[in-house]
Image (spheres, grey):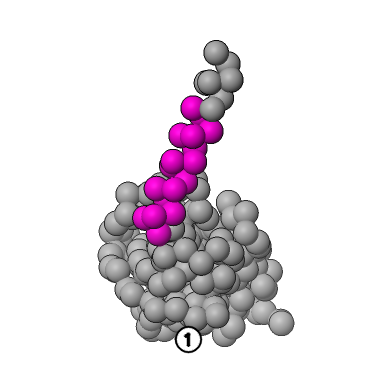
Amino acid sequence: MKRMLFVLVACALLATPALAVPSLGGWERGDPGSTYQRWDFSTPADPAIPETRDNRYGMPMADIVQSWGYMDEYMGRGGVWVGDPLVIDLYIPNQPVPNTYKEIWLEIGYCGTLLGITVEPYPGGVVVPLTVTTPFHSPPWRTSIYGWRVYPNPLEEKITITAIGTGGFVDYVAVDTICIPAPGAVLLGSIGVGLVGWLRRRRSL
């Protein structure tokens, strides 16, 4: 897919650092069953793989479905997709186990207007929105955080980002996820780990 290259005079704005995972469940990045992927769009590759990735279940991808093109630099940010509308589909592989639910947190740096961000689980599931916050605003750039839970956790989900306005500009997208097992499975797992430890101690006596 051909993309036009825009070159604009950049203003001096610092890039926004990634925020912490605002989980309602108390989990952290790197916990069992969690994934992390961040697209900084350092090149105009389409589809794009994340520059930062911790996902043992497969390769996440970003498909630029609709855009005006890619900018090497815009308003102090490097690597920006622009369009009106700008539509980006993210594909996030999951833990291939039917856990109770999956929690998803998406952080996005953009300017313009986010028309909406939707989650489509595959092969199906119930999507429950958690929250939307905009903790950082340095005009014209904003950082927003979206959260969802999917019951049960799917094999994969497609996250569609649609931006409009006087052009939608997306600088980066970061996604944290975790698959949460049923409480009984967690209890059985804890018992199993404890039993293994007890047997090892017995053998060492």
Residue at image point 44% right, 71% down: 152
- The answer to whether residue 205 is above or below residue 79 is above
Question: Residue 201 placed where, x, y %?
Answer: 52, 21
Residue 186 located within the stretch drawn in magenta: yes
- Residue 119 visible to an observer of this rendering: yes
Magenta: main secondary structure = helix
Farthest right residue in view: 1
Q: In which quadrant will I find the C terminus?
A: top right
Q: Is mark 1 on a helix, strand or loop?
A: loop
Residue at image point 37% right, 69% down: 148
Judged left or right of residue 120, residue 128 is left
- The answer to whether residue 20 is above or below residue 84 is above
Residue at image point 56% right, 71% down: 156
Question: Residue 128 placed where, x, y %?
Answer: 33, 75
Give whichever of 184, 179 is nearer the camera. 184
Magenta highlight range: 182-198
How many marks the image carries: the answer is: 1
- How would you rate the neighbour count of disc 1 (Cα within 10 Å): few for under 14, some for 14-19, many for 20 or more? many
Q: In which quadrant will I find the N terminus?
A: bottom right
- The answer to whether residue 161 is above or below residue 105 is below
Question: Residue 155 placed where, x, y %?
Answer: 56, 70
Quarter residue 141 falls in: bottom left
Residue 189 located within the stretch drawn in magenta: yes
- Residue 12 visible to an observer of this rendering: no
Give whichever of 189, 17 is nearer the camera. 189
What residue would you read off at disc 1? 85
